[in-house]
Each structure stands twice: as C-alpha cells, then as structure tokens.
Image (cartoon, rainbow, N blue to C red):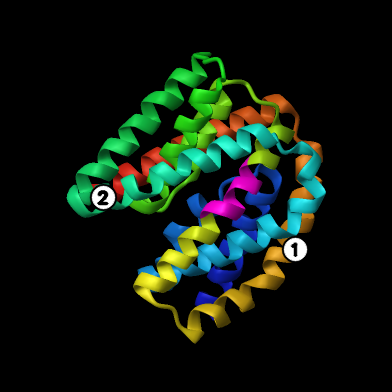
Amino acid sequence: MESIVLFTVIILVASLLQTSTGFGFSIMATPFLLLLFEPREAIQINLILSLVISASLIMKIRQDIEIGVLKRFIMGSLAGLPVGIITFLMLDMTLLKLGVSVLILVLTVLLTLNFRIRGSQKRDLAAGGLSGAFTTSIGMPGPPLLLYFSGTDTIKEKLRGTTLAFYLWIYAISLIIQIVFAGTSAEIWKSSAAGLPFVIVGLFLGQILFRWINQELFRKLTYILLFFTGVYLFLQQI
C-alpha cells in the first residue's frame, strides 16, 4: 500500500510540474521511481509517461513553439547523442555527474545574479547538442535547455512549448535506444498504464497552474529546479 501511495504522489507531482513548466518530470520522478523500481524500469516508465505528457499537450501549445529554435535543437542533438554515449562509455560516471552538478550549480548562481546571454543560431545548436549529450550520458535532457532559455530571458509560453516539443523527439529516440539495447518488459508497460490516470490529473491541474503563475514566479521556479537538479546529482555521487 505504501508503494502504491508513493507511486501515485510521484507521478502526480511530476506530471503537474511538467505540464505547468514544460520540464521537471525526469528531475522529480526518476530519483523517487528508483526507490520502487530497478533502474531500467524506472528510466523507461519515466520516458513513456513523459512522452504521453508531451503528446497530449502538443496540439494545445503548438502556437507557442519556436519552430526555428526547435529545428536547431534537434539538429544539435543529433551530434550530441553519440557524444553522450561515448562519454558514458569512456568516463567514470561518478566524476561525470559530479562535474555536471557543479556546472549546473555555478550557472544557476550566475543566472540568479542576472547573468544573461544573447540567443543565436549557433547557440541554439550548442544547447541542443548538450541536451542530446546529457540524455545519453546521465538521462537528463532538460538542464541545458533550461539554462539556455533562462539566460536568454525566454518568456514562459515559448519555453514550455519549445521544450515539450523537443522532448517528443529526444524521449522517443531515448526510449527506442533503451528498448533496443536494454530490452523492456510487460511490468514496465503495466506500471506506466497504472500511472496514466495520475498523469491526466496532473495535466488538468498543471494547465490551471500555468495560467496562474506569472513570468517572475516562473523564473524563480526554474532556478529552484535547476538548483535541485545540481544538488541531487552532487549528493548522489558522494
């Protein structure tokens, strides 16, 4: 019973966060799903439900998607995905995650101190490349995009729309890679199906929350999630 309650809370909160901000499902769900499932199962459940959320919202948010930026993110990720795999195979994962966590924390602090960058086509490609590399190395595509969008002061509608559209691509590719190289199981798909009702509730409540939070509150929430990600990755390795 405790496991069922924990699973329900994890999926509901992560879905609410993903729907209202465009990011956060992996950040919030993965650490806690690992308490209930084996790593392969936790990762694939996360990928499946994240895809459901993005697919469910894509028509509603299509007018908020920066198509040019999205295309460059995808192009960049094509180069980043194999780099991430090579990094995963060659480097010590503890050192890699420690380095990534410190980088995220330092950049988050700079953002809170109003450090800003100007968006450009080359930087779009670089952000997409880093996101692809992060996906296949540590399983988190979100931080590079959040740091980039925060640094360029992107409005919350464009951030959410473009990020969710990109997730449709990157999570689909990641799920295929997982199934091909790690396999899957009926238990994974049954657990994902069991989480769908709570995803639907999260979708509904998240839409309400998105309309309620203003740009300043949205920015602060972004910083909190980035900080949480950096701290989580750091503590996980020590």
Characterize the magenta stretch by its predominant secondary structure.
Answer: helix
The residue to which callout 1 is attached is 201
Q: Position of residue 226 (x, y in %)?
A: 48, 36
| Quarter location, residue 184 | bottom left
Identity of the residue drawn at 75% across and 29% down: 214
Q: Is residue 156 left or right of residue 236?
A: right
> In the drawing, what numbered circle is on residue 86?
2
User: Mark 1 vs mark 2: which is more N-terminal?
Assistant: 2
State which mark lies toward you, 1 or 2. 2
Quadrant of the rendering where the N terminus is positioned: bottom right
Q: Position of residue 191 (x, y in %)?
A: 55, 78
Q: Amino acid at mark 2?
A: Ile
Identity of the residue drawn at 45% across and 26% down: 108
**How many numbered marks have been drawn onto this rendered protein structure?**
2
Q: Is residue 145 left or right of residue 59?
A: left
Residue 228 in sight in this render: no
